[in-house]
Image (tube, rainbow, N blue to C red):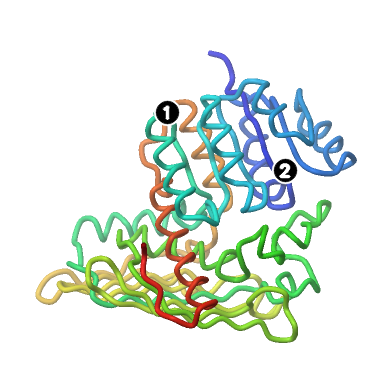
Amino acid sequence: MRKLRLGVIGAGSWALAAHLPVLAARRDEVEFTGVCRKGGDALARIKEQYGFAVASEDYQDVVAAGLDICIVASPAACHYEHALAALAAGAHVLCEKPMTIDPEQAWDLARKAREAQRTLLISFGWNYSPMIRRAKELVTRHGIGRAEQMTVHMSSPTRELLSNTGAYPDAAPDTVPEQATWTDARVSGGGYGQAQLSHALGLALHLVPERVAAAYALMAAPHGAPVELHDAICLRLDGGGIGTMSGGSSHLGAGGNKHALQVRVIGSEGQLLVDVEREAVWLYRPGGADIQLPVRPGDGAYHASGPAGALVDAGLGRLDHNPAPGELGARTVEALALAYRSARTGNLEERR
């Protein structure tokens, strides 16, 4: 059986830190076919390190080499173009978050993947972790009814990154991210919301499969930051429920690099708590289930290796479940688009 032909579009700092080491460990199944990134020196170094056959600053050269699986880890504004090309070439695709900036483009990618009968995975790492898989199984088995109120909170050490005064702590040290990737809103789509709340939404809307109908948002960019560092958002859900989502850029090194991320949902028939920082999962139904999942230290950690591993499994036809499909990515994109639109207009913005 021949190996899966791999393409990487956007071999930047995070792809090098999280995705490529996972694929290198599966060389018996993966052929390193093509890689694309800006910067000739870095590109040559990556080609030599991983043994890519094709290395180019033009992503079309990678797609033309023939792909079975493809990682799209370019800046967010490029995701639609790059993922669309990879799907059209017949590849299963892992797309970094945020999936796109424009909701119409996100839904189009999800539709194109279905039509092509290809798997589209979004890099929501927590969704691949054993703790969240078990939490999802718990909700599916017992349920909490219709979501009436949802609270999502996240904080992570991105203050320096989003202020152009430092790098993200999980980034590969030999390839520093371009500042524009994170702090030019034309490229990134925004600040903390796109960089991190995309993860929080990917987790919350995975556990409780709702769609955001409207949002009212306040965003703050203190100390002259080029994009917002902090977000406070009120949400209205399609099912009639309401919610809040907040996020903040904490200081680098404050408490290590353990993200605070918590989802609480009050449903018509029960309640749910998922806390990745404190590593707790609890579901309650009056007169029925009152379950706190047993977890071990480290179970709440971000599962950086999960997305790339799932991509290989999809290419081999072994992926039994996609915890972060394109449709989920599209729901997160449209929720964030409503929030950013509201922050600009000062109004409650409804989905069109």
| Left or right of residue 251, residue 189 in this image | left
Callout 2: helix, strand or loop? loop
Residue at position x 55%, y 57% in the image: 101
For mark 2, does the 10 Å Cα neighbourhood hold few (<14), some (14 to 19), or many (20 or more) residues?
A: many
Residue under label 1: 116
Callout 1: helix, strand or loop? helix
Q: Nearer the viewer, residue 228 or 166?
A: 228
Is residue 82 positioned above or below 68 on the image?
A: below
Query: In the image, residue 192 lies at what x, y percent?
Result: 60, 71
Query: In the image, residue 244 lies at what x, y percent?
Result: 39, 79
* CB contact under 8 Å: marks 2 and 1: no
| Left or right of residue 313, residue 34 in this image | right
- Residue 129's disc is none
* Amino acid at dot 2: Ala
Extreme left residue here? 287
Q: Nearer the viewer, residue 229 or 77?
A: 77
Foreground tag (2 vs 1): 1
Extreme right residue here? 41
**Which quadrant does the C terminus fall into?**
bottom left
Residue at position x 46%, y 39% in the image: 120
* Amino acid at dot 1: Ala
Q: Quadrant of residue 225?
A: bottom right
Residue under label 2: 11
Is residue 47 positioned above or below 347 on the image?
A: above
